[in-house]
Image (cartoon, grey):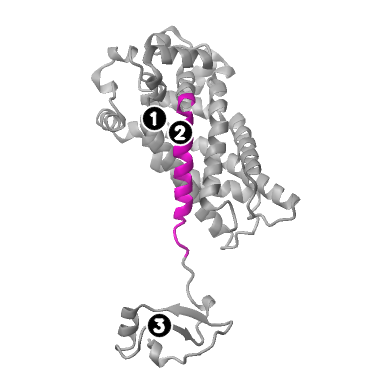
Amino acid sequence: MDSPASLPLEPAPAAATLAVQLSPAAVATAAGGAVAPGTWRIAGVTAASLPLRRPLPLEHLAGGVAGGVTSTLLLHPLDLIKIRFAVDDGTSAARASRPHYTGVRHALMAITSSEGVRGLYRGVTPNLWGAGTSWGLYFMFYSSLKTWMQAGDTSRDLGAARHMLVASEAGVLTLALTNPISVVRTRLCLQTATIDTTLPESQRYSGMLDALRKTWRQEGARGLYRGFVPGVWGVSHGALQFMAYEELKSMLNRQHARTVDQRLTTAEYLTCAAVSKLFAACITYPYQVVRARLQDHRASYSGSMDVIQRVLSREGPRGLYRGLTPYLLHVTPNVCCVFLVYELVTGGGRR
């Protein structure tokens, strides 16, 4: 390959040329040490003639992590209550092994009186890890796949079907990497200060690492991936949510005669996030109940269909929506916080 010294150089800029900044070491090596380092304009070399290398979208990873951690710190107590409602099947055996609550307010008061404010933050460590990692990876995978489908043109509107496809692919990749954290989070959120003293040592956890270690020893990899199948069902939740979010953003931009990658106002971002989350949650919530019950180490189910059959026979269709109220109270401000922080960190569209 010719060195910079042997290529024809142009003293003035030209539209078809590409400025290449060479380091002193690179110039000395390429030119045999005879040419001083500097900026060269190489005739015949254009941006289109060089291979396009897209860097890993770390800003999307950072934005997702920041949003997930912020929302978890603010709203973890509601997530804990949602999990406890979801695993309560109403039987006397279940109520003997875990506390029973009549509503969100009663749950908050009962947990605070028996365990203190600290009780509302049981399982917060794996939840911070899980939310930060999940949102960070999800946004990174989603933005990478979306940019690839757009062929680098961020102003190109993919449409609802492709947005769902991209969100589904990102969801499966994220779930495969973070399911063990979800298992640990669920089990730590179900622990109480009093009832759990009767459980064997192998089912009592002092923290996130202890829970991971004991689950691995007692149940192996299968234990860390409990709830994976309904989690895959839950990918449809993320797909519906992101499809609705993207379509709402595009609709607002079209109404104002803007390109689809233009930045929205804070109020518009919050509205899109809240509406898209409520839309997806009301359609797909039953998978949350199935997944939580499979991950509950004090219950025994043979699989997802076993959970569904037993819930329907004992509790009716309403049982598949246990915990929906605290879930909506938790996820609506949660997703607004996540998406707003994410858009602020990443620039919210074209800059």
Q: Is residue 45 above or below residue 51?
A: below
Disc 1 to disc 2: CB gap under 8 Å: yes
**For the residues marked 1 and 3, what is the alpha-carbon distance in whole angstroms?**
53 Å
Q: Secondary structure at mark 1?
A: helix
At label 1, the amino acid type is Val
Q: Residues within 10 Å of mark 3 (few under 14, many from 20)?
A: few
325 relative to 226 in the view: left or right: right
Residue 56 among magenta residues: yes
Q: Label 1: which residue? A: 124
At label 3, the amino acid type is Gly
**For the residues marked 2 and 3, what is the alpha-carbon distance in whole angstroms?**
50 Å
Q: Where is residue 317 shown, x and y percent of the image?
A: 58, 19
Residue 112 among magenta residues: no
Q: Is residue 180 above or below residue 317?
A: below
338 relative to 1 in the view: left or right: right
Q: Residue at x 35, y 83 (%)?
A: 27
At label 2, the amino acid type is Thr
Q: Where is residue 133 shown, x and y percent of the image?
A: 41, 42
Magenta region: 54-78
Q: Secondary structure at mark 2?
A: helix
Whether residue 69 is visible, yes or no, is yes
Q: Residues within 10 Å of mark 1 (few under 14, many from 20)?
A: many
Q: Which of disc 2 and disc 1 is earlier in sequence? A: 2
Q: Label 3: which residue? A: 38
Q: Label 2: which residue? A: 72
Quadrant (top left, top right, bottom left, bottom right) of the N terminus? bottom left
Q: Which of disc 3 and disc 2 is earlier in sequence? A: 3
Q: Where is residue 264 shown, x and y percent of the image?
A: 64, 49
Q: Is residue 283 above or below residue 112?
A: below
Whether residue 306 is visible, yes or no, is no
**For the residues marked 1 and 2, what is the alpha-carbon distance in whole angstroms?**
8 Å
